[in-house]
Image: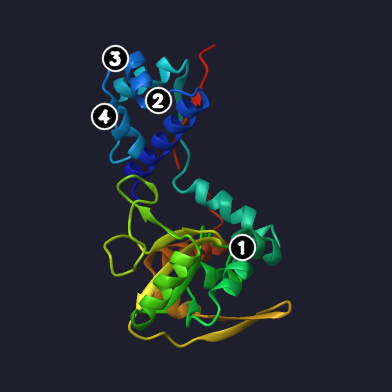
Amino acid sequence: MSQSSRLATEIAALLRRERGARQLTQQQLADRAGTSQSAVARIERGDRVPGIPLVERLFAALGLQIAVTAEELDSHLDARMDALAARSLDDRIDELRLDQLLNRLGDLPHLLTGSTAALLQGAPVPADAVEIAVRWGDSARFTAWLEAAYGQRWNARWREFGGLYPAPEEPGEHYWSTRYGKIRAQMCDELPEAIEVRHGNRSYRVVPLVTVELTDPQAADLLRRHRQRSAEGSPSAAGPVARTPQ
């Protein structure tokens, strides 16, 4: 994610949260700030970084002001990696709801991949969803499982889950929220070679790290960051926060 798109996403989330905390509709906030409801909606979708004067007016209408802090690049990611490294693998598995989701997948052929596979192989990289590889030939079975699990697909336009048909063949990111947790799928013609990782009383079939780095750009970036920090130890992001004027 580029710095500009990350900033737009942070402003969007902050504005939604503060508006929701005050139980205001988008139209009510727009009226207070002297703008249109569609302008508020665009900012809350995070499509692009909005103009500073409008952002200031919107937060002022909520009784807040924006304070911007500058940090070294990727410091938020470094801090998250440090926190993960300090936690046990059991805690990280539980937080991801990995075992619960795998139990529910039943006999659907799959492998763990991406950051989930990296986590199980000892890398303290963030994973916001269980990541699996699934064959296109099993797409119908996967779709049926998603429907039974009340799966809602990530809608990039609205930056939330829902409003899209869950089938992987349909346009959109292969990312769903289900009753058992969040899941990402890497659809492939054939499942890659796997290794078995044992933890506790359970064995996990995972894609080896070398394959993850070749097939998953996002996970590859995280793994490179992990290795770089192990060698150098350099922290690194900037983001807005809302404050009540003093």
Which amino acid does the dot numbered 2 rest on?
Thr
Distance (Cα) linking label 3 and label 2: 14 Å
Who comes first in sequence, dot 1 or dot 4?
A: 4
Mark 4, secondary structure of its residue:
helix
Which disc is residue 38 wearing?
4
Indicate the position of residue 29 as horizontal and vertical percent values.
Answer: 37, 20
Mark 1, secondary structure of its residue:
loop
Who comes first in sequence, dot 3 or dot 2?
A: 2
The quarter of the picture where residue 95 lies is bottom right
Distance (Cα) linking label 1 and label 4: 37 Å
Location of mark 1 (residue): 97
Who comes first in sequence, dot 4 or dot 2?
A: 2
Location of mark 2 (residue): 25
Q: Can you say whether 140 is above or below 97 in the image?
A: below
Compared across the picture, whether 173 is left or right of 74 comes to left
Q: Can you say whether 176 is above or below 105 in the image?
A: above
Which amino acid does the dot numbered 4 rest on?
Ser
Q: Give the class, few, some or many, for how many residues have Cα within 10 Å of label 4's Cα (few <14, many ≥20).
A: few
Indicate the position of residue 66 as horizontal and vertical percent values.
Answer: 44, 23
Q: Give the class, few, some or many, for how many residues have Cα within 10 Å of label 2's Cα (few <14, many ≥20).
A: some
Nearer to us of marks 4 and 2 is 2
Which amino acid does the dot numbered 3 rest on?
Gly
Where does the C terminus fall, quadrant-wise?
Answer: top right
Which disc is residue 34 wearing?
3
Distance (Cα) linking label 1 and label 3: 44 Å
